[in-house]
Amino acid sequence: MIKIYGTENSRAMRPIWTAEEMGIDYELIMMPFPPRVFMKEYLDINILGTIPYLIDGDIKMTESVAMTQYLVEKYGPTDLRVMPDEKDYPSYLNWLYHSDATLTFPQTVVLRYKFQEPGVADAAVEGYSRWFVSRLKLLERELEHKEYLCCDRFTIADICVSYAINLAGSLGIEQAYKPNIKRWTDQLFDRPSFIKSRSYKYEEN
């Protein structure tokens, strides 16, 4: 069975949400954040100590967007996947990589210095928050008159990109909820599979 290691409201939500949408059986191991500090034995499983981490037999993966792509390609067919012969396929790929490389990256800096090391680099928190918001221009424009990012249907591009907006809310970056983005995420975050994926929490034994 697939195992997914994660922490509350982390990028693990991407593969969890995908698995839930697809009805895939998986085992979820929720850990305290950051696990490399509060669950040091996790380093024996994932030498990087990062989350999420996915194990499927001999397959081991560290990147949340790659996990979502792996799940739809291995365990499909599913409408969550955009196929190479579909018109929006290049856009689909671009949004998948954009979700982490462009959007989530500046948020990791805000997360570190706002919650893990508060007061150490307040200027970085403010600067990277503004940087993140400025990077939403493309997304806001893309969603004009569109319900979903690709192919007029819900796909993992929506899952991967919208996680950054969910995280922005948790980080207090309310400026992220621009009109088109808010309309788009309102419907996505109302999906039962998203609500379930966001509900998982670490519980001490």
Image (cartoon, rainbow, N blue to C red):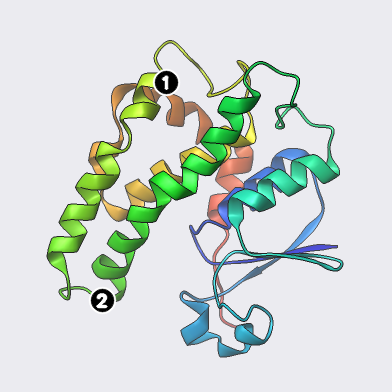
The CA distance from mark 1 to mark 2 is 35 Å
Badge 1 or badge 2: first in the primary sequence: 2
Label 2's element? loop
Residue 22 picture location, percent across and down: 76, 40
The residue indicated by pointer 2 is 117
Q: Position of residue 99 (x, y in %)?
A: 48, 43
Where residue 102 sits, quadrant-wise, is top left
Q: Is residue 203 left or right of residue 143?
A: right
Q: Residues within 10 Å of mark 1 (few under 14, many from 20)?
A: some
Q: Secondary structure at mark 1?
A: helix
Residue drawn at x 68%, y 44% is 18
In the image, residue 182 above or below residue 26: above
**Label 2: few (<14), some (14–19) or many (≥20) C-alpha neighbours in 10 Å:** few
- Residue type marked 2: Glu
Q: Residue furthest top?
A: 145
Identify the residue shown where x is 61% and y is 27%.
90
Residue 178, can we see it? yes
Q: Which residue is mark 1?
A: 142
* Residue 191 seen in render: no
| Residue beneath the point at 30% across and 33% down | 177
In the displayed structure, 30 sits above or below 98; it is: below
List x then y, in percent, for residue 180.
36, 22
Q: Is residue 24 left or right of residue 119?
A: right
Please state which of residues 61 and 154 is positioned toward the viewer in this rendering.
61
Q: How many marks?
A: 2
- In the image, residue 197 lies at what x, y percent? 59, 50
Using the rendered view, name the quadrant where residue 1 is placed.
Answer: bottom right
| Residue type for callout 1 | Glu
Residue at image location 34% in from the left, 55% down from the top? 107
